[in-house]
Amino acid sequence: MFFGLFKNKAKAEPKKLFYTTDIHSHILPGIDDGSPNTEISLALLSAMKSWGIENVIATPHIAEECFENSTYTIKCAYEKLSTYMLDMGIEMPVSYSSEYRLDGGFKRLMANNDLILLKNNYLLIENSFVQPPIDIKNIIYELQLKDIKPILAHPERYSYYQRNKDVYGELFDAGCEFQINLLSLTGYHGEREKETAMWLINKGYISFVGSDLHHFGHVDAINRFLASKEYDSIAERVKDIIKNDELK
């Protein structure tokens, strides 16, 4: 059974990730397009533990019309997983926030101060993949007025920003920090996404890396990446510029 993965086995240790706190994952059960149940959640956590992750921040989607979650539904899913982990005798620090889509629902949550913040008042936000929010700079400014520090999830995956890279500098200068996906560095999302992620690293725009883990296909991609020769060089370039472990 996969629960055994939490135990030490007599075999060569795999390479570990260059951070120990993952700030972006979809491992809460039955709440979005990530883990469908507690058993899968535990298996995904087991994989993360094998990568050297010691603290996991689950960030289920909140987005109008597709993932209409709330603080309450996220808390319920978290408590369900926590109870299951306790019953199974599994110890691993897991907390939760959300990945907030910048839509009308987000603006209402922001106005009502109904946001689940990360440590140090950080907040993970995301754009639609279809088109950018026309008022993203205003949203960044309004969050800052509330002493909230926005982190834009996977900016390397937005094709409209890939075609106009000047926007990255504008958002960065406006005070928005960036979190690239570990999966983008593996090439899982495509070569353009990988190239853009590396471009952002080279520009010094990256503050965080997240697994954005949803399912076992992602696990396989990250396992292959950790076993590759390329991993060491990328890890060396990124490990000293990210702030993941400040949020544990």
Image: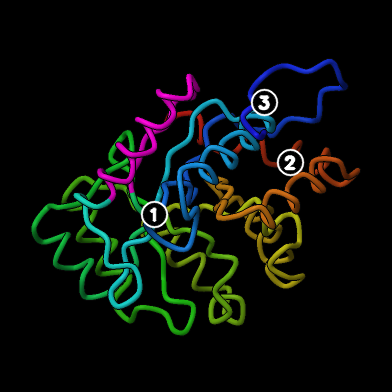
**Of residues 191 and 66, the one drawn nearer to the viewer in this rendering:** 66
**Of residues 215 and 233, the one drawn nearer to the viewer in this rendering:** 215
Residue on which the image places disc 1: 60
Residue at disc 1, secondary structure:
loop
Residue 22 higher or lower than 194, as above or below: above
Magenta span dominant secondary structure: helix
**Of residues 127 and 99, the one drawn nearer to the viewer in this rendering:** 99
Residue on which the image places disc 3: 4
Q: Residue at x 86, y 47 (%)?
A: 230
Q: Residue at x 33, y 39 (%)?
A: 80
Residue at disc 3, secondary structure:
helix
Residue on which the image places disc 2: 237
Give the mark nearest the N terminus, 2 or 3.
3
Q: Quadrant of the C terminus?
A: top left
Q: Residue at x 23, y 66 (%)?
A: 106
The x and y percentages for residue 13 are: 82, 23
**Foreground tag (3 vs 1):** 3
**Circle count:** 3
**Which amino acid lies under the numbered mark 2 shown in the image of this protein?**
Arg
Q: Which residues are magenta?
A: 74-97
